Amino acid sequence: SVNPDLASERQTASFCVEKLTALLDGGAEQTRIRRAVVAAIQSDPVFSRENQYFQTQNERYEAAVRKAVHLQKKMHEMGWTENGPEYKYIYRALSGDVAFLLHRVFMRSISVLGSDKQIAKWIPLATQLRLIGSYAQTELGHGTYLQGLETTAVFDIATQEFILNTPKISAMKWWPGDMGRSATHTVVFAQLYIHGKCYGIHPFIVQIRSLQDHSLCPGITAGDIGPKMNFEAIDNGYLMLKNVRIPRENMLSKFCEVRPDGTYVRQGSQKINYFTMTTVRISLISDEVLIPLMKACTIAIRYSVVRRQSKLKPGEQEAKILDYQTQQEKLLPQLAAAYAFHFINDYLQELFDRGYREIQRKNFDMLPELHALSSGFKAVITHHCTAAVEICLRACGGHGYSLLSGLPSLYTKILASCIYEGENTILLLQTARFLIKCFMAASAGQPVPPSVTYLAAVKPGKCPAKNKSDFLSPDIYTEAYQHVAVRLISSTAAKLQDLIQSGAKKYDAWNQCTVQLVQAAKAHCHYITVKNFAETVEKLETKAGIQRIMKHLCDLFALHGIFSNTGAFLHDGYISAAQMDMVTASYLDLLAVIRKDAVPLVDAFDFTDKSLNSALGSYDGQVYQRLYEWAQKSPTNKMSPAYERYLKPLLHNTLSKL
Amino acid sequence: SVNPDLASERQTASFCVEKLTALLDGGAEQTRIRRAVVAAIQSDPVFSRENQYFQTQNERYEAAVRKAVHLQKKMHEMGWTENGPEYKYIYRALSGDVAFLLHRVFMRSISVLGSDKQIAKWIPLATQLRLIGSYAQTELGHGTYLQGLETTAVFDIATQEFILNTPKISAMKWWPGDMGRSATHTVVFAQLYIHGKCYGIHPFIVQIRSLQDHSLCPGITAGDIGPKMNFEAIDNGYLMLKNVRIPRENMLSKFCEVRPDGTYVRQGSQKINYFTMTTVRISLISDEVLIPLMKACTIAIRYSVVRRQSKLKPGEQEAKILDYQTQQEKLLPQLAAAYAFHFINDYLQELFDRGYREIQRKNFDMLPELHALSSGFKAVITHHCTAAVEICLRACGGHGYSLLSGLPSLYTKILASCIYEGENTILLLQTARFLIKCFMAASAGQPVPPSVTYLAAVKPGKCPAKNKSDFLSPDIYTEAYQHVAVRLISSTAAKLQDLIQSGAKKYDAWNQCTVQLVQAAKAHCHYITVKNFAETVEKLETKAGIQRIMKHLCDLFALHGIFSNTGAFLHDGYISAAQMDMVTASYLDLLAVIRKDAVPLVDAFDFTDKSLNSALGSYDGQVYQRLYEWAQKSPTNKMSPAYERYLKPLLHNTLSKL
């Protein structure tokens, strides 16, 4: 039985939910395949997540290994293959709660960086899980700045081996997943030395645990780095190497090789490697960032029509909390952001597929733009979505704080996406460097990549909006975003030049501009997101109410961005104070409009109750019943020794006093 | 041995750290007492927190009970009393990691709401921990809106008892601390019914567990609500009552009494009760909000001078990350906020002490202002500090995400302060209601309370700053904050009036203004915080460099607020675009100035390594060593059954293949 407060929300949907789901999936056939995968996974008790909020780190790890091993079997049973259409939905259906993810990165790095011989040797073993791999790049003292890695690999001509060492504690490998307890092998990134000369960072396959009894190999110190904010299922590990000898053949040698006589040979272009790292940033957006936000919106919005608090009108019953403007203003912009980023993700995926095809044809022209876009959007989307999930959590009051709401684990997991695969601030500065370069080029009349041609067409002027409904025109707000991006990029470029002309060293001038460079990079990505959303809406079919509601969400996303960042638009008077008041009025009006479709809009994300794993977000909205039933299963509802040891002695003789 | 990168930071302090510590403590004698308490607690192994990041919820609960019981003994041993000068430092020294905190609320509610007879009966038993109390107000379906509570207490004249019931699932008591597993008694808030008539919410003492064997009493269903984002040590509980009969004497009856014949008598004023709730909001700021922020700043800033990454200047060694402008811009404003809120907390404490004295003299005039201030500042400070701790966590990159950094637990704990003791948005709207009322009164020439007299003196005009150094004048920026507060309050009051005049119902008009009302309430609190910081700095002694560095922090806090919220200041042109550029320049300059004293400024908070419980924040800065040593102790570094069960069968026969 569906909670009537939730049921009533579904009766008045202004659009066809099933059609919107198909749009999000990329077609009704995709929806069908996705649902089949989800059903198969979620009906299998081995993949159950029901106890996960009660489990210790040890229990979570064990369950993740069990699931990973079982998944091999399941895929065979279901006829799913790595190249089949089902594959991309498996991880989503498991909510990422499975081991051996770094084993995949181990395989990918061998496939990309290894010679044909190396691929032929290692990939079949890895595919059959006859060894377990990891990927050991990050060190205790070194992350994003790869050149700073300290692990060494010295070539010994006499034995035709590399000797690997961790010269000091900051060089210890730290964080690699699957390495703390599972891995038998890992790809170690180390500074290559031949005859005392350093050739920079190279990848080496190193066995770290015995295949016989899983004991650590000689010279290896390794273990688990302990508890984290989330990722309990993953055995992130540490690794120290002491005179570990590996054969010459274990250096991955597609691009670089050390010949038996110690000659170092570099072959082909390494650019393609950077492109692999670039694509990882894009590929994580969907599963690790958008799905958590969509789940958080689903949970918080369903809860907000079931939870009633205080009276909106005197004499009536307590109101659904989603009827309060403040609650709408918390949640609905996050919902709009989920859609905005879904569409920009489609755009980026397409762009990267195209880039990949070009690169296969040895055309590397798109690389700088793709690097800048992947860096900037990874940073902007992870940052925005992390903040959005936190808002959803806090908008559910006390119950949002219970692990059983599902929101804390969504938050603590998405938060990591701001840090891994490139720390966000550093990534934004890489985007900024590209933007400044392009701005200079554009100013000098040189050609620039497609995504930044707008920098060449700087138009002064004012926003032409005359009344609040003008701000529901995509041209009006897209233009405003573009104006701000250009202003921030050009003014920071000017500051940079001024500093250098006043005698500052280039690196010093750069550092003094970084706070503003970060703002400029964000403005650029925000502009492209708004523009892409508006263009996507334009192209949608008008039937079934889809285009209408998407247009509202696009308007809301755009106006929320202006409302939350008024200074950027007011600064040079592009938007006047009177116009800003119109923005505010239009924005607040939109909240009330979208509120009516809020539940259908999250229903369209099509999460099953098992996917959400939340007492607040279930499809039937039986929030209180579920919280109560679930809490009773907590291990904290078994007797603890605290009573016998500590409480009984205190309480036992009180009875006579009462 | 102190990490040389950290040691060098201390050698160049521009002020006397010990003097600043004494200032924060309220005098050198207070510092001495605090340190003695901390030393006594932290040298006692029972109070150790070293294993806490590895413990399950059950283990944390048990440790908290052990500590609470041991604390009784310790206080006796040390000669500490509840009225002694040491008392306020005990909880801080324990980092709140102790059971029976709600037992204290149980006692306080009896002391405040109970008759002399009730106090005489219950308080001695509770003081000796011969029973364990809790405080059962919140229900599954009801939080901030107390009138909505559904638990009933029906008076039965025949037996002279109250019959307590939980009429439906949403009426189940949910969240009370110490109730899930420990409490024998609790104060239940329930709707009182006599002869079928409802008299509203009243407090009743109910026994829930046997003193003999701790089994649940007849009619009681109770247990633990399960895992939360933090507070593992606390057994937050649920409670259902089914025809639970308690004697007439168990209704707390200082202000309201039910006579044997069923007559309901209300005595005296209940206003004092609200004042108790008000003071709780202020009292939590110090231990639950400011201390965590100060700890987070200490950890993140010490780490940021030990961690080196990338090169700032070509050819040099990798730079301390605190030398990057972006890192300074993350952390230093949070440091300034910690000081700003420390001083506003002093101001509020003083104001509330004064208010308390007035109220004891039956003068209730200050109540509305105190209520508005406590609501607004609770919301603004908890919100700001929660965001600040999150920034500190993220500024430490991957290591900040390890529980061993101490930052995740600080974040997940401080986050709760935004929700408990009044949800922040609701509190801000209460402040806003007061502000609108005062603005109307002031506009009509009526007198208003001291903190809002500025509303009466609305001056149009522009910011007079001529160059960037003018923005280091407290008059200039305080005036700007005042201007914005007045503008937001007056414009929202005008919108409210317009809506009502256009025929909107009052409650509807209010709801349509709530997003802006929240902004207005925040602006008011922000203004008072800046003003108070500036006035505090003015009064400081100039010697030992204290006033100078506090002035810098005050400037930074004020300018950061403008820089982060430029639109509010630009909107009506009070600050022009050219002036805003001066603000930005001044603000960025200040970062570089304060960066030099960043470590001494966190050293002045005077946390011991045991208080911080962080691998990143230790006084000696031996970050990597500590992470490694600590991680090795994690229970995830013991053998898990996953190997035998799942990995061994996969790996065992691979050996022959390699």
Image (cartoon, coloured by chain):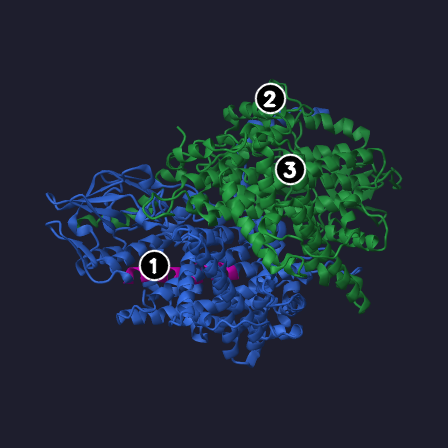
Chain colours: A blue, B green
Front-most of B415 and B123? B415
Chief secondary structure of the magenta span?
Answer: helix
Residue B270, numbered circle: none
| Residue A332 in view of the camera | no
**Mark before the other along the chain sequence, 2 or 3:** 2
Front-most of A354 and B460? B460
Is residue A273 highlighted in magenta?
yes
Query: Which residue does the numbered mark 1 point to in the structure image?
Result: A277
Q: Position of residue A9 (x, y in %)?
A: 64, 67
Question: Do the CB atoms of the residues marked 1 and 3 lie less than 8 Å apart?
Answer: no
For marks 1 and 3, give the CA distance. 50 Å
As drawn, A600 above or below B108: below
| Residue A630 in view of the camera | yes
Front-most of A411 and B345? B345
For marks 2 and 3, give the CA distance. 42 Å
Residue B73, numbered circle: 2
Query: What is the chain identity of the residue bearing mark 2?
Result: B
Residue B537, numbered circle: 3
